[in-house]
Amino acid sequence: MLAIASDHAGFDLKSEIIEHLKEINVPFEDLGTCDCTTSVDYPDFGLKVAEAVASGTHDRGIIICGTGIGISIAANKVPGIRAALCTDTYMARMSREHNDANVLALGARVLGVGLAVDIVDTWLNASFVGGRHQRRVDKFADIETKYSKTHT
């Protein structure tokens, strides 16, 4: 199951992506926000998706804010999350194949709907290739451990 969320700036793009997910029969859960008129804080929605993915209740996630930058920074604070801000399909494919990204971040103010949907499709259909990339992905966890407040 896919988790998806946005702040108010990303709400309209999130709605378009949700319609596309329905068309291609991808199960998802919308974790908010519920409208584009009430200002909300993007870290809250990045955290919701990141926690859903990190806990294992959802396989992957999509997060959207105005640029995708802030919401991806928030999501990447959660251990085990590899949120990738993608602005084209090549980045989307590489984020999955080489980095095993489990959260896709998009910027609603920098992407048109058509390109955003293409990025989502590419990201959903790409798979981690492992091999030499596994060693590098494992280093992400090593960094998390090194800087964890519970690490002694």
Image: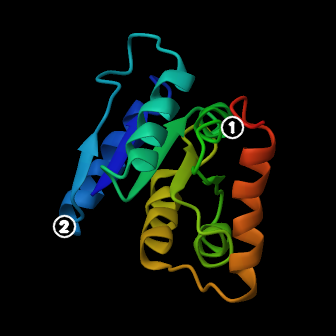
From the viewer's side, name the closer residue of 98 and 41. 98
From the viewer's side, name the closer residue of 125 and 55. 55
Q: Is residue 78 left or right of residue 138?
A: left
Q: Is residue 73 left or right of residue 129?
A: right
Residue located 79% across and 50% down the image? 143
- What SS does tag 1 mark? helix
- Compared to residue 143, the image places residue 11 above or below, namely above
Residue ranking furthest to the front: 152
Q: Amino acid at mark 2?
A: Asn
Residue placed under numbered mark 2 in the picture: 25
- Compared to residue 107, the image places residue 122 above or below, namely below
Residue 64 at x, y percent in the picture: 50, 39
Q: Is residue 49 left or right of residue 98?
A: left
Residue placed under numbered mark 1 in the picture: 69
- The quadrant of the picture occupied by the C terminus is top right
Q: Amino acid at mark 1?
A: Ile
Residue located 40% across and 31% down the image? 11
From the viewer's side, name the closer residue of 51 and 112. 51
Label of residue 59 in the image? none
- Report crowding for label 2: few under 14, some 14 to 19, many 20 or more residues within 10 A (C-alpha): few
Residue ranking furthest to the top: 38
